[in-house]
Amino acid sequence: MGHLSPSHRVAAGLSVPPGLNQPFAAAQAAWRFYANPAAGLPRLAGPLHECARATAPGACDAHALVVLDWCPLHYGSHASKADRVALAHSKDLGYELLTALVVSDRDGSPLAPVCLELRAADGVHTTRAPRPAEAPSSLDGLAAVMGHAAGVLEGSGRTPVFVIDREADSVGHYRAWDAAGHRFLVRADDGRKVLHGGVARELGGVADGLRAAGAFAPSRGVEFKGRPARQYVAETRVVLHRPARTHRVDRRTGRAKHRNVPGPPLPLRLVVSEVRDERTGAVLARWLLLTNLPGEGEGAVPAATVALWYYWRWRIESYHKLLKGAGQQAECWQQETAAALARRLAIASMAAVVVWRLARDAGPEAAEFRGVLVRLSGRQMKRTKQSRGFTEPALLAGLGVLLPMLVLLETHTPRQLRRLADAALPGLLRADSG
């Protein structure tokens, strides 16, 4: 309940409902809870897992998209956090958060995170295990996260498809994930060398050839940076034939080690998505997508759908926004260890799940309720044909006003509140208002 309310940088502590007589004691109890080693991360993640399993059958068609992404949590000025690690550079201290977020394959709506991992100096604090695990390289750790997410979704009847940005463009990991039976969709680099038609070429050159051959077909209208655009899609088959090249840092010397690791050729689909200006036809963005999803036969996923699924990858950015900038202000939290911070992240994620469920509820009462919350939030919404009339941060802000108000109305009637306001602030409320 305390996290169903936005925080501010100057007051990033837990919001306490007005029904509690001793707010400071409640805040201290929350602080002790986050620091309690008995509150294990796997147990705290249990409600998130149940939500993903319960909502996936109704929200997804045949697949459940699992978006994997890393997000830095910067705590450069928090000297009390002794287990921080270096992020972008030696003076940029904080923690690295890896999230596996389940997203609907039907409309891209986020459902629930099924794994949270926080990298700190003492290891990786993960909802997969009760104790910190050894910190592997970022990509080496994905196999365990994929297996865990697949296990969580096993009872939902939906096949997980792991959607990852360009950080995961790695030949060795493609081969390992495919051998483990995982379906993946990864944005690749233009310079990736592949076999195309029996000839070794860079992916960027393959994409240029598809455009020269007129292979692109219009897919759908989209919005790009606030202006109308259209998405075009083309597809071909490529083979990853080159050895994988590892990049590991020797812990004793601190030097990087490189090694070529040969492996079997891996045939993949290359789906090229271009976003073009609606008026001029100029290419605004291009994505080169590699996937092992079937393109033909039973369970085939069309190229246009593959491109759409990657477009929905940005949903995880809205989750990080709820955590960091437009909701929970996670980078201002005062917990002094990564273990305590990870527990609070799990609780804050539950608040995000509540907001997402309200956002995708198609019932008339939910639509009216969202309008009420937007009014309570005091925020202005875009008025366009494509706009929903609300945002998740606005719903969170509205809940932060409504829930304490409902608790307060259990002890004070509207007439009593008006009398107190008139006595303390005469003339503030008109006689005919409310």
Image (spheres, rainbow, N blue to C red):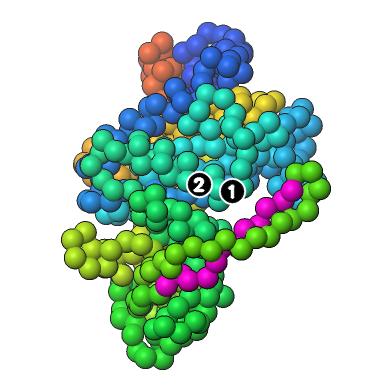
Report, in whole angstroms, how far the alpha carbon at label 2 lies from the one at label 1: 7 Å
Residue 290: image location, x then y, percent: 42, 66
Q: Is residue 117 above or below residue 143?
A: above
The C terminus lies in quadrant = top left
- The amino acid on which the numbered mark 2 sits, given as a three-letter code, is Leu
Question: Residues in magenta?
Answer: 239-250
Residue located at (70% from left, 47% from top): 87
Which residue in the rendered view is the most extreme toward the left?
A: 298
Give coordinates of residue 30: x percent, y percent.
Answer: 56, 17
Examine the residues drawn in magenta and state their main secondary structure. strand
Can you give x and y, in whole percent of width and height, for residue 252 in the image?
79, 43
Can residue 401 be seen at all in this image of the molecule?
no
Residue 142 bears which disc, if any? 2
Depth check, front residue: 194 or 67: 194
Q: What SS does tag 2 mark?
A: helix
How busy is the neighbourhood of tag 2: few (under 14 within 10 Å), some, or many (20 plus)? some
In the rendered image, which residue does mark 1 sit on?
Answer: 138
Q: Residues within 10 Å of mark 1 (few under 14, many from 20)?
A: few
Tell me the quarter of the image containing the N terminus: top left
Horizontal placement of 122 versus 169: left or right? right
